[in-house]
Image (cartoon, rainbow, N blue to C red):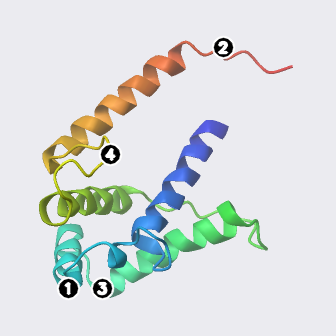
Amino acid sequence: MTVDGNFLDQSVLEWCKLLGDERAQHHWTKVVSNKGKFEDELLARLRLNATAFQAYRNEMREYRDKFVAHLDELHVMQVPRLETARASVEFYHAYIVDNEAPTGDLAGLPAAAAQLRQYYDQCTAEAARIYQHIDKSPVR
């Protein structure tokens, strides 16, 4: 249970760096050269309008701010659904590969947008293999 929560929290933190927090170094507004094109294509890919995406962004940031970065006065955790986060990160990667990144500039990440899902599946399989060999007995 703790590991799942940690992965969830880390996913939200990383998503906010890319798409949720304009102050973050790797936020899309600081990376892409054609902001209008990126935003239009992102919203089309997600099948959301700007208002709906902003609401999702607010939901992710609230979870990050109220439960991950600080444990504030809220007593009930509202875990965000991650389908939109995953789809937006997949789009972000594809856009960077196709429109922004010079060849060889992705530091070990897939250089073709179509390879991202395969890369994800390989990482998931690796984690599953490692997890199978972990001693799962209670810590004393």
Whole-Å distance between the Cαs marked 2 and 1? 50 Å
Q: Amino acid at mark 3?
A: Ala
Image quarter of residue 77: bottom right
Dots 4, 3 in contact, CB < 8 A: no
Q: In the rendered structure, which disc, 4 or 3, sits on the residue that comes first in sequence? A: 3
Whole-Å distance between the Cαs marked 4 and 3? 31 Å
Whole-Å distance between the Cαs marked 4 and 2? 33 Å
Q: Amino acid at mark 1?
A: Gly
- Disc number lying in front (1 or 4): 4
Q: Residue at x 44, y 59 (%)?
A: 81
Q: Which residue is mark 4?
A: 107
Q: Which residue is mark 1?
A: 36
Whole-Å distance between the Cαs marked 2 and 3? 47 Å
Horizontal and vertical percent for residue 139?
Answer: 80, 21
In this picture, is 111 found above or below 54? above
Image quarter of residue 115: top left
11 left or right of 66?
Answer: left
